[in-house]
Image: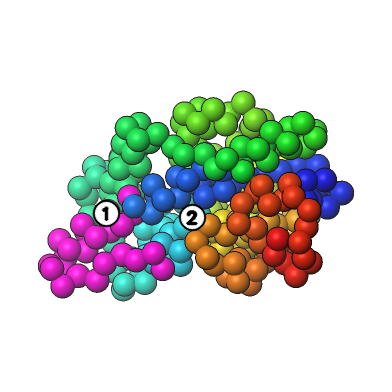
Amino acid sequence: MLGLPDTITTCLFDLDGVLTDTASVHRAAWKKTFDAYLKAKDGNDFQEFTDKDYNDFVDGKPRQDGVRDFLESRDIHLPDGDPDDPAEAATVWGLGNRKNEQVQHAIEHDGVTVYDGSRRYLQAAQEAGLRRFVVSSSANTEKVLEVTGLATYIEGRVDGVTLTQQHLKGKPAPDSFLAGARLAGVSPSQAVVFEDATSGVAAGRAGHFGYVVGVDRVDHAKDLMDHGADIVVRDLADLLAPRKSNDGNA
């Protein structure tokens, strides 16, 4: 059904990069945040934040984990600080809050692009009777779903707010997806994980989900397969078409 094994009853969708193009918004906000911090710290000779840094250390993770992991890759260790730290604070929370302010500004002023193939897949999943939930590390998930109109297709969500409230580990730990399965009232074996980040694909595999779909928006299909994807597609609409091959790519 819809390119999935017959045993699957429930879809667990990541948001950024899978349903919406907010991944590019997040990437730009992270770059602006980290480059400003690094330039203030090291001067004009600073080593800028790259797309590889985003993919390796930040993508798909809770905001504070992304800050810590990237800074540690540069041998920088900041105090955690507090959740209400101002954006200019040189703390993990401060940098995270600075990035979040930029994301919220972009969402409010520029809107959010929905991938057409993802909207069509959600509609087809709804018509087919598959359950539909969003599992995202973003604390802005509710706002994005409302702004884009995707909320009408989604039955429930596990997001950055949920992770904080329930003290769940972020991706690549499987905790958030397991929480999504519990919310749907199904076993992991009955659910499929849709992810564009290697950390999310790894989380789906670690949680022993019935199927893991990697969504390749940035030409890293091999990395997605290496981290545990059962199949990699360019767009969710590819799953609505006849399967072209059985080698892990549609």
Within 10 Å of the Cα at label 1, are there few (<14), some (14-19), or many (20+) other Cα atoms?
Answer: some
Side of 180 relative to 108 (left or right): right
Q: CA distance from mark 2 to mark 1?
A: 18 Å
Task: State whether the magenta stretch is mostly helix, strand or loop.
Answer: helix
Side of 19 relative to 236 (left or right): left
> Circle 2 is placed at which residue position?
61
Q: What is the magenta range?
A: 29-52
Instruction: Say if residue 54 shows up in the picture.
Output: yes
- Near-viewer residue (148 or 39): 148
Residue 37 rendering spot, x and y as whole percentages = 21, 59
Residue 132 rendering spot, x and y as whole percentages = 69, 37
Instruction: Say if residue 164 shows up in the picture.
Output: no
For the point 77% across and 65% down, which residue is it?
245
Q: Residue furthest left?
A: 43
Q: For the C terminus, give its image quadrant.
A: bottom right
Specify the amino acid type for callout 1: Lys
Specify the amino acid type for callout 2: Lys
Q: Residue 183 in magenta?
A: no
> Circle 1 is placed at which residue position?
32
Within 10 Å of the Cα at label 2, are there few (<14), some (14-19), or many (20+) other Cα atoms?
Answer: many
